[in-house]
Amino acid sequence: MEEDIQKNTNSQSENSTETSKQNIQKEAMGLFESIKKFLHELLDFRDDTDHEATIEAIKADIPFKGATAWILIFAVFVASVGLNANSTAVVIGAMLISPLMGPILGIGMSFALNDINTFKKSLINLGTMIGLSLFASFLFFYFFPLSEDNSELLGRVSPDIRDVLIAFFGGLALMVARTKKGTIASVIFGVAIATALMPPLCTAGYGLAKGNFTYFLGAMYLFTINTIFIALATFLVLKLLSFPMHKYANAAKRKRYATIATVVGVAVMIPAIFTFVQVFNESQIDLQVNNFIKSEIKTIENFQLIGDPEVDINKKEIRLSFFNEVTNGERNLLSNQLKSQEYSKIKDFQLKIKGSDTKSFELITTAYKEKREELQESKNIIAGLQKQIAGLQETISTLNNRIEQDALNKNQDVITFSTIAKVAKIRYADIQAIGFANVLSSSDFIKIDTIPVATVKWNLSLPDSIVSPKERELRTWLQKEMNLDTLFIKRE
């Protein structure tokens, strides 16, 4: 009897445990379904898509004529001025008014919908826009006199992995906004700023104007990256939302165009993937080079690095310049550290180290000190000479005063010559020198007369027609000032 009771108790316990497990499983499934439903409602945007309005809106932005052409030209000049003035705000304004995004979205949509006519229109209009933008920016930077390199320009000549990601995710955000019923204008403006299609084209025009093809190719590379990945994002969003394929009159034509679209799409995807991989690898190399400099070089006190490292990916070289002397042992140490697994992307690179010669540095330092001493000695000599000159000037002034005082003592009617000379210079600015003397003269070689003569030296650039009347005025004035009946003017 007791055994039966025990069995019933165990059976009831097992049933209770099984029921509890089933209840937990049901609750877990219910929670999972609730989370799934919440995420679906949160992230699914297919129900909010307007296929026809999206296609029409993209097609409406593809044509390039009339007002659109002028808007593009003005946007190019605004962006060029902003790049020239190194003004981020002005460059952003040019991004907002630029119509370049329309044909790029058209290219992505034409691949997704197998619409060969839209692809042709988009490609032609985009090519025209690019050519006009390059021409306008070339003219601006070629004729504008204040064009020079700055951070806004240099920031568009060396794209990295971040530019690829910005273009791709920006394109995704733009297309999601485009497909939504009631386009979100703020998203479109934000993507226009983030992807920055206009500044690279203006930078390319700057490179052409200055004959710097490195700038030109780098800027066009960045523009190509932005274009390809925005078009790719457009293609993916439209395919994800199951936009209807373009309908053709017959099956053969539809199949032919589908084949063309597929081939072109693959041809575009290949360089897009290659670009992504290449830019990603370059970014990884730059990152590891910077980490190597930070961890292995800047931590050593006696290493004084000059400037930034120069990385040549093609030759697999890293060039470093040091202010201090670098021994062979230190060179080998840095080369061995570079080969560690921490720097897997650059372990095959060669370090090209240029260090300063300590002896040369000491010679330069010694020569510098000697020149400073010579300069100080020269300054002392100049100061002594200046004192001597000041003393001589004071002596000359004293002698002049004494001579004039003697003249006054002899004849009170005689006016100080120095005063007359100063006034004459003020009245006649073209006089370079003036002198006065009583000259003994004889016309019959028997009788001797004393003749007052003023000797004047005029500015040689003055013609005789101007000097002659000035001399007559000067003679009249001198006669009056010196109380002379007769005065002769002699020109030097």
Image (cartoon, grey):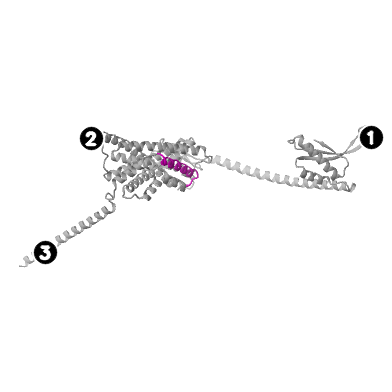
In this view, the mark in front (1 or 3):
1
Depicted 492 relative to depicted 18: above or below:
above
Numbered disc 2: secondary structure: helix
Report which residue position mark 1 lands on.
447
The local crowd at label 1, few if under 14, some if 14 to 19, many if 20 or more residues have their Cα within 10 Å, is: few
Q: Earlier in the sequence, mark 2 or mark 1?
A: 2
Q: Earlier in the sequence, mark 1 or mark 3?
A: 3
Identity of the amino acid at label 1? Lys
299 relative to 492 in the view: left or right: left
- Which quadrant does the N terminus fall into? bottom left
Identity of the amino acid at label 3? Gln
**Of 149 and 111, the residue lying toward us:** 111
Q: Earlier in the sequence, mark 3 or mark 2?
A: 3
Task: Give the image location of residue 65, x and y in percent.
Answer: 40, 39
Task: Give the image location of residue 26, x and y in percent.
Answer: 18, 58
Report which residue position mark 2 lands on.
251
Q: Magenta span covers which residues?
A: 65-87
Identity of the amino acid at label 2? Ala
Report which residue position mark 3 lands on.
12
In terms of image quadrants, where is residue 204? top left
Numbered disc 3: secondary structure: helix
Say if the magenta span includes residue 78: yes
In the rendered image, is residue 37 in sight? yes
